[in-house]
């Protein structure tokens, strides 16, 4: 018997292994059925449980963001994820331009420089012309325009200036010698001290007298019109003199002048009447050489920007003690002697 077992030992071991395997398989099958039944009977399992997983697109959204990348929007104070906003060293102290109210470059506020993306670390920033328009940052600030916008310009006439020596004038000296009645109307006798064209003699200049009624212009000086007559008497050293006045209006400027009737008194003086014929302006944009522009009274003239792409047309309407008066699109500007133009308020 012992020899029989020894001779078939390997078969006995194989059979035992098979029996163990079959038992284990049966055990697992039974427990698997129990697990399926427990899942089906739970609230979350099976078709009768009523549970439906919520669809999710989070993974899709994340992948989309990863493919497109994220943009960093700079902060208004100039800071970045890695660098703080700039500070300035002034008088040994670090200054934050965003804090406080004291401007770095008066009168321009720090916030205005920052809002217009200008380098406020540049000590000469107010004298710069970032877009080469012919105007400095200071001039753009004063005009209320954007120095970084190539389509915005302060008035080009702001670059005009002139000197007293650049004004060309004509002086008229007239004498009012009295009045006469002629066919029921009052005629005033006027004689030019300097030769004036005489329409009655083919417009040849002379100093002969001309008779003018109220409302008419003076022959040879068509811009001067007689508008009024004032009778006046004056006693000087017990002697009475006729000092009546003839009121003359300059139709170009609206100015009025009084011509005192000529008499033998030592107080009598002639009244010169001046008419500006033209003005010689100096026109200089920032970064350009000055130009000379001669403009006649009442005439239009055109100014160009630095790149010649922007033009403005003005009319020289008047010149008086206040300066040269310009007009453009219903707006008026005054250029004073030795200074540049400013809007008339």
Image: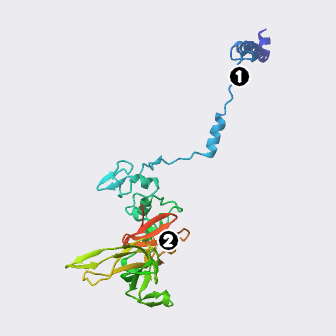
Is 117 positioned to the left or the right of 37 in the image? left
Q: Nearer the viewer, residue 183 or 270?
A: 183
What residue sits right under mark 1 in the picture?
A: 52
What residue sits right under mark 2 in the picture?
A: 315
Instruction: Give the secondary structure at mark 1.
Output: loop
Residue 294: percent from left, percent from top: 46, 79
- Can you tell which of label 2 and label 1 is closer to the viewer? 2
Is 330 positioned to the left or the right of 255 in the image? right
Q: Residues within 10 Å of mark 1 (few under 14, many from 20)?
A: few
Q: Residues within 10 Å of mark 2 (few under 14, many from 20)?
A: some
Marks 2 and 1, how far apart in space?
83 Å
Say which quadrant the C terminus sits in.
bottom left
Q: Is residue 15 visible?
A: yes
The residue at 66%/37% (across/down) is 60
Residue 158: percent from left, percent from top: 44, 67
* Residue 26 vertical position relative to residue 226 in the rendered view, above or below: above
Q: Nearer the viewer, residue 324 or 109?
A: 324
């Amino acid at each position: 018997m012992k020899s029989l077992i020894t001779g078939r030992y390997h078969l006995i071991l194989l059979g035992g292994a098979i029996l163990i395997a079959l038992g284990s398989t049966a055990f697992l099958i039974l427990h698997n059925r129990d697990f399926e039944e427990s899942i089906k009977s739970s609230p979350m399992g099976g078709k009768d449980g009523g549970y439906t997983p919520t669809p999710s697109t989070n993974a899709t959204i994340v992948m989309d963001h990863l493919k497109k990348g994220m943009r960093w929007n700079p902060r208004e104070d100039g800071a970045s994820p890695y660098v703080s906003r700039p500070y300035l060293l002034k008088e040994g102290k670090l200054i934050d331009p965003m804090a406080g109210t004291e401007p770095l470059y008066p009168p321009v506020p720090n916030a205005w420089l920052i809002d217009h993306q200008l380098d406020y670390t540049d000590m000469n920033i107010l004298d710069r012309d970032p877009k080469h328009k012919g105007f400095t940052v200071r001039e753009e600030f004063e005009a209320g325009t954007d120095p970084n916008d190539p389509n915005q310009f302060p008035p080009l006439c702001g670059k005009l200036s002139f000197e007293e020596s650049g004004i060309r004038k004509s002086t008229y000296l007239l004498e009012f010698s009295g009045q006469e009645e002629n066919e029921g109307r009052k005629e005033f006798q006027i004689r030019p001290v300097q030769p004036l064209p005489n329409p009655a003699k083919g417009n040849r200049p002379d100093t002969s007298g001309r008779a003018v009624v109220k409302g008419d212009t003076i022959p040879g000086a068509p811009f001067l019109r007689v508008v009024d007559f004032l009778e006046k008497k004056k006693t000087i050293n017990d002697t009475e003199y006729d000092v009546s006045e003839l009121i003359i209006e300059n139709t170009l400027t609206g100015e009025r002048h009084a011509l005192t009737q000529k008499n033998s008194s030592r107080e009598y003086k002639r009244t010169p009447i001046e008419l500006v014929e033209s003005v010689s302006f100096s026109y200089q944009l920032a970064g350009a050489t000055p130009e000379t522009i001669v403009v006649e009274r009442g005439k239009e003239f055109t100014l160009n920007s630095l790149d010649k792409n922007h033009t403005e047309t003005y009319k020289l309407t008047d010149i008086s003690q206040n300066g040269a008066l310009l007009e453009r699109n219903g707006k008026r500007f005054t250029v004073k002697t030795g200074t540049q133009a400013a809007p008339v308020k």
